[in-house]
Amino acid sequence: MTSTHTDKPTHQKPLRIWPGIVAVVLQWLAWVVLPIVAPEAMLYGVLGGVLGGGLAVVVWWLFFSRAPWLERAGAIVLMPVAVFATSYVVHPSIANGMMGMMLPMYAIPVLCLALVCWAAASRSLSRGRRGASMVATILLACGVFTLLRTGGLSGDGDSDLHWRWTQTPEQRLLAVASNEPMAVRSIQTARKAGADWPGFRGPQRSFAAYR
């Protein structure tokens, strides 16, 4: 009695990247481009881009990416943890912006883009290197926000983002005012001239000259 036994190595199927690329492109179009093209649809762009696009990327990553389950679960767990940790080191204007929701709202599209780019770029790496590069990519994506601050929201709802080390609008205004002493002296001179001309100011002013 003879028996044949063949051991066929099992290979991980290649990652399915294109649904993630489509999802993140649509997400950024809705979040960035739609408010520019149609400002009245800004709310729909924010909701569709941040929430709808974020949900689409998560669904792709968990159920259609073909990534190892350890990587799928690891990315989904690590991203909110990284955002939470980043909230303690970002500029206060970002940590408290939009009633404390600014960092999560901005982090979702950025992290989705980082995840898709990492998945596309790391397909040929070994499992260990893929895991390490995934952690590094997520941390770097969150670290970008530590370099920024905001001066508030514009009338169109856009955040006035600047580098963290640059001067605030108030500081720039005060710097301009301190460099213009002549403007202050000219105002004082004008006030004195008005006081010396009772026909222009004071109880004896007359409007006959303007008739």
Image (spheres, rainbow, N blue to C red):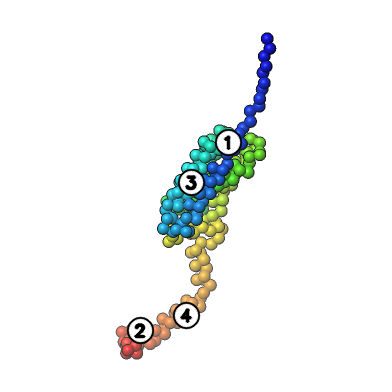
Closer to the camera: disc 1 or disc 2? 1
* Mark 3 neighbour class, 10 Å CA radius: few under 14, some 14 to 19, many 20 or more: many
Residue carrying label 1: 67
Residue carrying label 3: 53
Instruction: Report the amino acid beneath label 4.
Output: Ser
Q: Find residue 201 and name its label.
A: 2
Closer to the camera: disc 1 or disc 4? 1
* Measured Cα–Cα span from mark 4 to mark 2: 17 Å
- Is residue 27 left or right of 7 when viewed as pictured? left
Give the structural element (helix, strand or loop) at label 2: loop
Give the structural element (helix, strand or loop) at label 4: helix
Q: Measured from the top left, where is residue 102 in percent x and y?
A: 47, 51
Give the structural element (helix, strand or loop) at label 3: helix
Please tell me which of labels 3 and 2 falls first in the chain.
3
* Mark 2 neighbour class, 10 Å CA radius: few under 14, some 14 to 19, many 20 or more: some
- Is residue 191 left or right of 140 when viewed as pictured? left
Question: Of residues 95 and 39, which is closer to you in this image?
Answer: 39
* Mark 4 neighbour class, 10 Å CA radius: few under 14, some 14 to 19, many 20 or more: few
Please tell me which of labels 4 and 2 falls first in the chain.
4
* Measured Cα–Cα span from mark 3 to mark 2: 64 Å
Q: Image quadrant of residue 115?
A: top right
